[in-house]
Amino acid sequence: MHQNCPMIPSPPTAADQRRRLRLRVAAKLMVSVAMLCLAYVLIAQVFTGGGETPSMPSLRVPIADLLPGESRIISWEDRPVMLYRRRDEDLAQLQRDDGRLLDALSNKSTQPEDYRGDFRSASPDLFVAIALGTDLGCPVNFLPAQTARFQGEPWPGGFVDTCRKARYDLAGRVYRSQYADRNLVVPRYVLEGDTLILGR
């Protein structure tokens, strides 16, 4: 009676060994590239912090005709930007201590470092911000002063988003007890006479 013997696998050929070596090298290379990409992203996040907004192409905007108490929304790189010319009473309001503000000192805000402070701007009379709420990214509109009360006081003027009605003061600082919990984003810009240059 004939008994079947188990087949003994033949030793790998030189071609098989080369193929396996190439696969191992390729797998190690892929892991190394993934680790390098991850390290780059982490390092980039650390070194690009500090509240600065990403650089974008610049836009020159004439502002000589923007009068005190007036607002305007312009488009910059497919994003709405709010301009508001502040009045003397607006500046006085912004300098008063308002405990209703969530981040009055703008410590957790996004704005150029040298624009931090009561006004969050390059010049006290002009406020510039990305006109998108920090809750759901909905458009933000200017809401003038009203006798109607907000959080116990007459509304002094500021900004309101169009979705869940979060409100911000005339420096884009968010009030407490709302869905939004961050101040409006202030982009990098400079003023040259009666021209606003966004992205510089």
Image: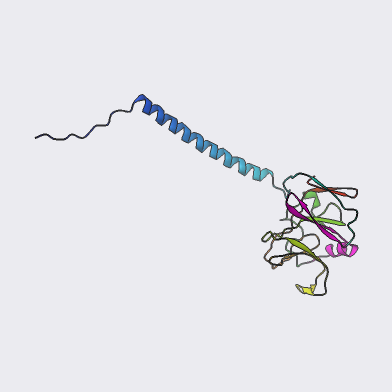
According to the image, what is the colour scheme of the structure? rainbow
Residue 60 placement, left or right of 161: right
Q: Position of residue 138 (x, y in %)?
A: 70, 61
Q: In percent of the image, x 28 and y 29: which residue is there? A: 10
Q: Position of residue 75 (x, y in %)?
A: 77, 53
Which quadrant of the figure has residue 168? bottom right
Q: Nearer the viewer, residue 192 or 63?
A: 63
Q: Position of residue 195 (x, y in %)?
A: 87, 49
Pick out the residue farthest to the top: 14
Residue 13 placement, left or right of 140: left
88 inside magenta stretch:
yes
Q: In percent of the image, x 78 and y 74: which residue is there? A: 149
Q: In percent of the image, x 81 and y 62: which residue is there? A: 170
Instruction: Count the labels in the image.
Output: 0
Q: Nearer the viewer, residue 139 or 37?
A: 139
Q: In percent of the image, x 58 and y 40: which residue is there? A: 37
Q: Considering only vertical position in the picture, is 176 above or below 26?
A: below
Q: Position of residue 68 (x, y in %)?
A: 89, 61
Residue 89 placement, left or right of 1: right
Q: Quadrant of the N terminus?
A: top left
Q: Quadrant of the C terminus?
A: top right
Q: Nearer the viewer, residue 177 or 141?
A: 141
Q: Considering only vertical position in the picture, is 76 above or below 25?
A: below
The region drawn magenta spans 69-98
Pick out the residue farthest to the left: 1
172 inside magenta stretch:
no
